[in-house]
Image (cartoon, helix red, strand yellow):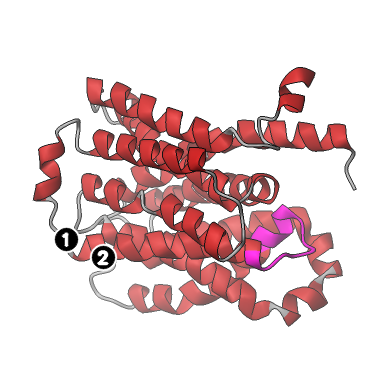
Amino acid sequence: MPSELGTVRMRRWAVALIWLIPLLWTVNIVVARQAPGVVSAHVLALGRWGIAGAILAAFSYRELWAQRAYVWQHRWRYVALGGCGMWICGAWVYLAGESTVGMNISLIYASSPVLIALGSVIWLGERFSKRQILGVILAMTGVVHVVVKGEWVHLSNVHLVPGDLWIVATSVSWAAYALLQKRWPSPLGSTAQLAAACMGGVAVLLPFAVWELYQASTPEVGAHALWMMVATALFPGVGAYWIYGWTQKILGASRVAMTLYLGPLYTAAVGWLVLDEPLGLHHLAGGVLILSGVALVMAVQGVLSRQDVSEG
């Protein structure tokens, strides 16, 4: 068992690393905008998680081999995790980008932390204070303010298209992925656990990718597509998912889920730097609300405790 000081240090690392999760996920947003016409959704997702799973398995093969009986015994758990986290939250995001706009994707996907927070209270028995509820409201307000560019009247112009429905399903699936990991405690470490989930995801993705490859309209997998697979495997794949799983064990599902509220803020910055999309005052106002909401949810006992501050 880790010492008290070791536990405090792990929490400090977890609090610091969760801010990196949405930045890594912005790579997936850039790729999703460029993927149509270059590579199909399930083929891209299969390549992404096949590469990510191979990397993770290489780092954790001894643990996976030692725990092979456990993994096989609970194989359907990993198929479920892979279906939620790698199939639906992987390929379906790329499918959504073919027919819906970024505003709708950001607005709908922002419901994931709320679903996770509610599920954590109802299903996992986690505590959720009035301060944290206020944090959720502030963060959600900030997200909406960013995606509507400060013009709230645009909310009345949101129309659901097939892509919106894909994102609704993705939001629910991400909540399920996060909650199931807490519901099903595992003796595997974070790397081996994610590697096993990748195996389940590849098993689910494979038949869909094969079907797409046999379609006449599916583009051939060229160098550009391969680079997309590698980029999404390393950054939003291995990086973001590993940090998410590790920090969730330390901080709890509902608190780590709040980092998803930072997505629009990080996306705005990446869009400005990479895609030459301008930043406006609505980003500043929304950022203040988002960061304030995250701070309220994070400022709970055991995360930013007095003991942790005094030792700093």
Disc 1 designates what residue? Answer: 160
Q: Secondary structure at mark 2?
A: helix
Tags 1 and 2 touching, CB below 8 Å: yes
Q: Answer whether residue 194 is magenta in the image.
A: yes
The percent coordinates of residue 118 (x first, y second) are 48, 57
The percent coordinates of residue 41 (x first, y second) are 35, 63
Kindly report the distance in space between the C-alpha atoms of the residues bearing marks 1 and 2. Answer: 7 Å
User: Residue at the location (56% across, 66% down)?
Assistant: 123
Left/right placement of residue 184 relative to residue 282 reads right
Disc 2 designates what residue? Answer: 165
Classify 10 Å Cα crowding around label 2: few (below 14), some (14-19), many (20 and above): some
Does residue 46 appear anywhere in the picture? no
Identify the magenta region. Answer: 183-195
Q: Secondary structure at mark 1?
A: loop
Left/right placement of residue 19 relative to residue 31 reads right
Residue type pointed to by label 2: Leu
Classify 10 Å Cα crowding around label 1: few (below 14), some (14-19), many (20 and above): few
User: Residue at the location (70% across, 33% down)?
Assistant: 13
Residue 150 found in image quarter:
top left
Q: Answer whether residue 197 is magenta in the image.
A: no
